[in-house]
Image: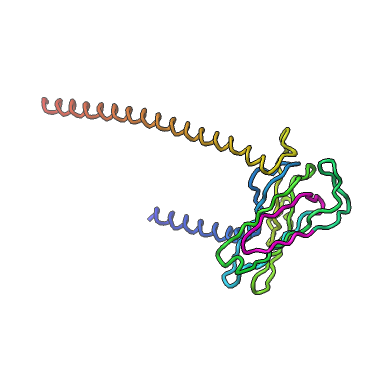
Amino acid sequence: MKASRLAAAGALAGSAVLALSAPAFAHVTVQPESTPAKGGYVVVDFKVPNERDDASTTKVEVNFPTDHPLASVMPEKIDGWKIDVTKSKLAKPIEMHGEKISEAVTKVTWTADGKGIEPGYFQKFPVSVGALPEDADQLVFKALQTYSDKEVVRWIEVQAKGQAEPENPAPVLELAAAKDGDAHGTAAGTADDAKPAAQTAAASSSGSKGGSDTTARVLGVVGIVVGAAGVAYGVFAGRRRTTA
């Protein structure tokens, strides 16, 4: 009875957690494909899920930060989507590779040529961006999601420090500290740098497996010895009882 009550309580708690966390899955988010180091370049994916069950997502607009403009913004071509890149004059020109940049991309719009993102699915929209600012810890991208029934959901609310997440949070990209010599690298260079790390992780995993196998063998031998000792003791005790 006690076990069944605990199981029921656990199931109820799990359901409550899922219920509370479910809306978070519907948010438009920005996810880097590699470490977004300050001063460097990175490919980011704007992940757009369709939480509706009666309409498709047919248009996605992502507004790029104007307080920390990005001189290089290149979206990846996606089948079934038309891409429009909007550039605007900067109030304060920025310098990149020794050249002054007076305009930058302020918005990228993806418009579906067909069905768009159907209910129960999501779509990633990759964009190569850089150079990332060296004087900021994060970048905020405000996004608008338009559905086939003309409804528009605005993911534009910025979460205040120490406050609960807003109902329609804006996608936020957290920036990592720049490493020596990596501040002005490229997205391709970052991807290449990730290969040795992956190989190291694989080697480490293999080493851990070998260590686990050795431990298992030792425990197996110990188990056999203990078992043999138990059998011997049982036989000895049985003989003593028979003699008695």
Q: Quadrant of residue 88?
A: bottom right
Q: Is residue 40 left or right of 117 when viewed as pictured?
A: right
Q: Nearer the viewer, residue 151 or 80?
A: 80
Kindly identify the residue that appears in the image at 74 percent across and 53 percent down: 140
Q: Residue 202 appears at what percent x and percent y?
A: 51, 36
Kindly identify the residue that appears in the image at 68 percent across and 73 percent down: 150
Q: Does residue 81 show up magenta in the picture?
A: yes
Classify 155 as above or below 194: below
Q: Nearer the viewer, residue 231 or 67?
A: 67
Q: Does residue 241 show up magenta in the picture?
A: no
Could you tell me which quadrant the N terminus lies in? bottom left
Q: Is residue 182 left or right of 12 when viewed as pictured?
A: right
Q: Nearer the viewer, residue 234 or 179?
A: 179
Residue span colored magenta:
66-86
Kindly identify the residue that appears in the image at 65 percent across and 70 percent down: 147
Q: Residue 28 appears at what percent x and percent y?
A: 65, 59
Q: Is residue 225 left or right of 160 when viewed as pictured?
A: left
